[in-house]
Image (cartoon, rainbow, N blue to C red):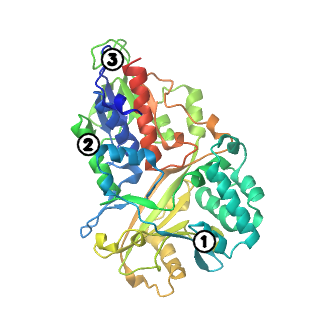
Amino acid sequence: MSASLAESSPAPGGKRLRIAIIGAGAAGLAAAYDLTRAGQHVTIFEASAEVGGLASGFKAPHWDWSLEKFYHHWFTSDSSILGLIEECGWSESVLFPRPITAVYHAGKFYALDSALAVLRFPGIPFIDRLRMGMVIAFLRLTPRWQPLEKVTADQWMRKRAGSRAYEALWRPLLVGKFGEEYYREVNMAWLWARLHARSQRLGTFEGGFQKFLDSLADKVRSQGAEIRLSTPVKGIRRHPVTGLKSAAGALEGGLSLETPQGPEDVDACIVTTSPALLARLAPELPQEYLGRLLTLKSMGAVVMVIALDRRLTPGIYWHNLPKEAGFPFLALVEHTNFISPEHYGGDHLVYCGDYLVPDHEYFRLSKEELLERFLPTLKRFNPDFDPGWVRATWLFKTPYAQPVPLLNHSRNVPDLKTPIPGLWLASMSQVYPWDRGTNFAVQIGRRAAHRVLAEQVHP
């Protein structure tokens, strides 16, 4: 989105609309940032008690920094969010260490975060390592993802990288992300996006993601936005009165939002939650469109955070884990091998995370039940581990964390503009072929704001 559009007041003949945004995550806050800079009246409705959505964090009393509930980081190529941070004047608060990422093979962990590390990896014959290097180079250099969505990642990588490399590296990644249920169906464009633009350096915000999101919330408030926390929207309907007066005084249609405080009349609404939630909120959407929303598949996430009194692993940040090796989760992420434990009162923080279908038993188990399953596994990372090292634990779950892109998925991605006038959707399911995350959440939120300004404010 151009800076001139974001900074302008409503042009002559333009309107000042009352715009609702559902969700105070990165997408909702980014949309509000641009809409308020353009002089629009914005109210954000957030069901949780804090801003941030899936990137929100929490803080123990003795910590200086917050910790994300679901592990997050940025890449140096994340131009959308880094550009927004630069606009706000906060670039000096962005940190880019280079942590170690490792994969599991034959009972050991091997760093696999550089071309040299790939060549040294013993889990694949040398000739296949060279072949895999050429495949990765091709995917990083080719700009066209469209042909790749016509074939599954399972088929493409097995053929191009070879069965031995596929079974050692790519199949475990796909199974971990999409489970046995979907890994064979995910298209190759998704894997292209993961390899095409990602960097080896990983970034965060000084103080934690929550500090960045709180700062962005304060910024949009200072520009005139209202943020209503702990205020879930229960329904969205076309306004029943024909000729509703807009905030600009013009006679036109509008929307009515059902909130705990009563109905809220608005001229436009941007929904930044899941497509399934939009389907529940707006039953007046045409049946064909509702059906398309409900056919979009996604994985949920279950993450346990464990605070230890000492380091678990010798400097490795991210451990990719194959399910067939008996690990009860997809990844072990030792956050304090990325960010110093001094920011967390000396606690050493470990994530045990997994992507799972929303009806998986992990969503029903309590923290104590999951801890009983997870703790014995920590000895596989450090034979000296003892449960007495544990200082505290936290458990976080969400049913909507990872969209599942099937063959020719671009045909299934809904437009930002829904069939109901004034109702817009800006969700993780629409950033395809890119993967979910705060960078593309900012991008989709600003795209939605741009469309609202172009089509409703200055039609």
Disc sitting over residue 14 in the figure: 3
Q: Secondary structure at mark 1?
A: helix
Q: CA distance from mark 3 to mark 1?
A: 57 Å
Q: CA distance from mark 3 to mark 2?
A: 24 Å
Q: Secondary structure at mark 3?
A: loop
The quadrant in which the C terminus is found is top left
Quickly name the residue at label 2.
219
Dot placed on the residue nearer the N-terminal end, 3 or 2: 3
Dot placed on the residue nearer the N-terminal end, 3 or 1: 3
Residue closest to the eye, 190 or 372: 190
Horizontal and vertical percent position of residue 136: 65, 58
| Tag 2: amino acid | Lys
Q: Nearer the viewer, mark 2 or mark 1?
A: 1
**Which residue is painted at 44% across and 85% down in the image?**
386
Horizontal and vertical percent position of residue 414: 55, 33
Q: Nearer the viewer, mark 3 or mark 1?
A: 1
Q: Quadrant of residue 223?
A: top left
Horizontal and vertical percent position of residue 322: 62, 69
Disc sitting over residue 181 in the figure: none
Q: Kindly tell me whether residue 50 is visible in this rendering.
A: no
| Tag 1: amino acid | Ala
Q: Quadrant of residue 295?
A: top right
Q: Residues within 10 Å of mark 1 (few under 14, many from 20)?
A: few
The reply to whether callout 2 and callout 1 are in contact (CB within 8 Å) is no
Q: Kindly tell me whether residue 317 is visible in this rendering.
A: yes
Quickly name the residue at label 1.
117
